[in-house]
């Protein structure tokens, strides 16, 4: 028996705007280029203005050669920013204030 799909709940986030800041893709001209890519993902976020419900998020994804030194077929990066509004009924204790300098997190895959 199949479990019926659960209805989607509304997100407490509403996107106000987004913008692609950088898009770069470079193809290798090396005959020895390897198809695998290493990804590096950086996220920065901060509250906007004095309103604790408005946030800015910036996502940067860099991709390129693995650490083994072999060139990759492609390399480049994508950087996008977005402004979000947290729903006014979202529990305030779940919103953690951030300094304007922005919190940063990095992940390598």
Image (tube, rainbow, N blue to C red):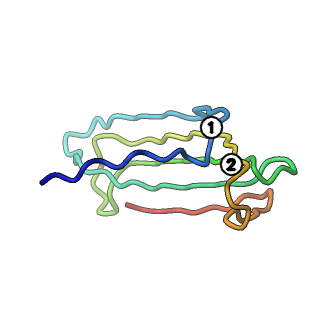
Q: Seen from this angle, which residue lies furthest left? A: 1
Q: Which residue is mark 2?
A: 86
Residue 84 or residue 24, whichever sits in front: 84
* Horizontal relation, residue 26 to residue 84: left or right: left
- Please report the residue visible at 31 percent of the width from the left and 37 percent of the height from the top: 28
Q: Position of residue 36 (x, y in %)?
A: 25, 51
- Please report the residue visible at 47 percent of the width from the left and 62 percent of the height from the top: 107
Above or below for 106 versus 24 = below
Above or below for 15 versus 32 = above
Residue 90 or residue 65, whichever sits in front: 90
* Horizontal relation, residue 78 to residue 89: left or right: left
- Please report the residue visible at 63 percent of the width from the left and 40 percent of the height from the top: 14
- Name the N-terminal-most of marks 2 and 1: 1
Q: Secondary structure at mark 2?
A: strand
Above or below for 20 versus 57 = above
Above or below for 26 versus 88 = above
Are the two marked residues, 2 and 1, in contact with CB atoms closer than 8 angstroms?
no
Q: Seen from this angle, which residue lies furthest right? A: 50
Q: How packed is label 2: few (under 14 Cα within 10 Å), some, or many (20 or more)? A: some
Q: Position of residue 89 (x, y in %)?
A: 70, 52
The quadrant of the rendering that contains the N terminus is bottom left
Q: Secondary structure at mark 1?
A: strand
Question: For residue 26, which quarter of the picture?
Answer: top left
Residue 60 or residue 89, whichever sits in front: 89
Q: Which residue is mark 1?
A: 15
Q: Position of residue 81 (x, y in %)?
A: 62, 40
The quadrant of the rendering that contains the C terminus is bottom left
- Please report the residue visible at 55 percent of the width from the left and 46 percent of the height from the top: 11
């Amino acid at each position: 028996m199949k479990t019926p799909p659960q209805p989607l709940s509304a997100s407490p986030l509403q996107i106000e705007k987004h913008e692609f800041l950088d898009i770069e893709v470079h193809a290798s001209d090396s005959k020895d280029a390897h198809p695998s890519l290493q990804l590096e993902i950086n996220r920065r976020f901060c509250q906007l203005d004095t309103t604790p419900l408005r946030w800015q998020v910036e996502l940067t994804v860099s991709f390129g050669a693995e650490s083994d030194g072999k060139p990759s077929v492609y390399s480049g990066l994508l950087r996008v920013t977005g402004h979000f509004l947290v729903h006014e009924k979202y529990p305030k204790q779940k919103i953690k204030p951030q300094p304007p300098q922005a919190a940063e997190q990095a992940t390598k895959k």
